[in-house]
Amino acid sequence: MDANELRAMQAPIKEKYKSDAGSAMITLKAKGTLDDTSIACKVETGRALAVAGLHPATGGSGMELCSGDMLLEALVACAGVTVKAVATALEIPLKSGKVSAEGDLDFRGTLGVAKDAPVGFAQIRLRFDLDTDAPQEKLDQLLKLTERYCVVYQTIKSGPQVDVTMART
């Protein structure tokens, strides 16, 4: 896909959102079912069933997906799609590229071993390794716009309001 094809594909969508802002507000959903026999949750991904469980650092077997890994994978996926779309729109040729993310966790927090240890990632590092001949100023623009338009990155960075409820079924 080139920049013109991308613009042509997105033009009617952008026009609709400009004329009807409400149509741009979409609720994405995720569902999971608690496993009956082990400490795991079966998550419907839309393409397959992912089974999330405890990380080995918290007593898990390592056979299930760690939700922390899944968060980083979602960041990599979103950032990868975004950098490719922005590069296409800006006509920055990419011969190839890799996206990686890593995050630091102190498992004392999630296990309740140390009250001063945070629960969650203390730091996340996102890295792009791109094979391109584009000048540095174009790469700087590419990174800036990728950060701006990557949904998962912006969600993690901005920390949206999250409401939690619990109900009996």
Image: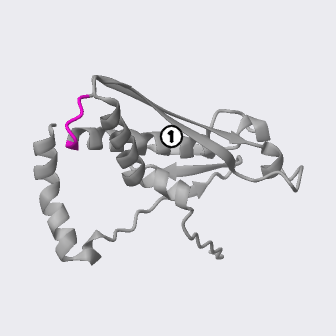
Magenta stretch, overall SS: loop
Say whether residue 91 is magenta. yes
**Residue 55 pos. (x, y %):** 70, 39
Residue type, label 1 = Glu
**Residue at horizontal 56%, vertical 50%?**
42
Say whether residue 74 is magenta. no
**Residue at horizontal 33%, vertical 71%?**
25
**Residue 1 pos. (x, y %):** 16, 37
Quadrant the C terminus occupies: bottom right
Question: Vertical placement of 40 versus 158: above or below?
Answer: above
Q: In the displayed structure, does residue 166 sit left or right of residue 83?
A: right
**Residue at horizontal 39%, vertical 46%?**
144
Question: Vertical placement of 141 versus 110: above or below?
Answer: above
Q: In the displayed structure, does residue 134 sit left or right of residue 56?
A: left
**Residue 95 pos. (x, y %):** 27, 22
**Residue at horizontal 64%, vertical 33%?**
63
Number of numbered discs visible in the structure rendering: 1
Image-quadrant location for residue 66: top right
Q: Is residue 8 visible?
A: yes
* Residue that mark 1 sits on: 73
Magenta region = 89-93
